[in-house]
Image (cartoon, rainbow, N blue to C red):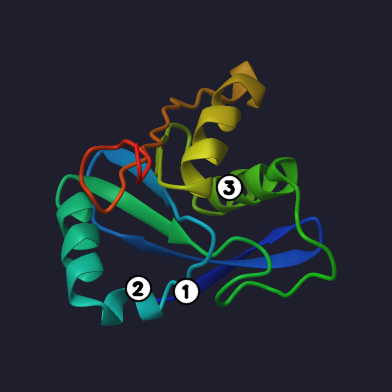
Amino acid sequence: MPKTRYAKSSGVNVAYQVVGEGRLDLVYVPGWLSNVEMMWENPMLARFLHRLASFSRLIVFDKRGTGLSDRVAELPTLEQRMDDVRAVLDAIGSARAALFGHSEGGCMCIMFAPTTTLGRRRERSGFAARRNSNGTGVPEGR
């Protein structure tokens, strides 16, 4: 299991891990809940993360209030959670990074791109998809 480290974001400790040695920094932004250490205990998720780390320097983190990051009294805003991503990128010295997320993490990625200071030389991309258990992407019952 990768070593868990912490970045400080507005007084909150944000847990993160770095895996792989690729030239591309790739931030995996999880959905609603996460735990950076428990991710590796799920064989399918661990295999997925190892595949991402095979071509990148993969950065995984727990958003504030989840997993190993500090608990918070109120539900964080997307802006606060984006600040957490910036804090992690700063902690690892990332000058350029791509973002990949699902569910709430996909929304964060999409919002991150236009709100990030252009002078920081960060590459930004986001991905969000919806697919139901019926495999069509169409809401059940339609």
The local secondary structure at tag 1 comes to: loop
Tell me if residue 82 can be seen. Answer: yes
Q: Earlier in the sequence, mark 3 or mark 1?
A: 1
With 88 as the anchor, is 141 left or right in this view? left
Residue 101: give x, y in percent of width and height: 41, 44
- Amino acid type, mark 2: Met
Q: Residue at x 36, y 37 (%)?
A: 129
Residue 39 disc label: 2
- Amino acid type, mark 1: Asn
Residue 35 disc label: 1
With 47 as the anchor, is 60 left or right in this view? right
Give the image quarter of residue 43. Answer: bottom left
- Amino acid type, mark 3: Val
* Between marks 3 and 1 in the image, the one whose residue lies nearer the viewer: 1
Q: Earlier in the sequence, mark 3 or mark 2?
A: 2
With 70 as the anchor, is 32 left or right in this view? left
Mark 1 neighbour density, 10 Å: few (under 14) some (14–19) many (20 or more):
some
Residue 110: give x, y in percent of width and height: 52, 29
Residue 85 disc label: 3
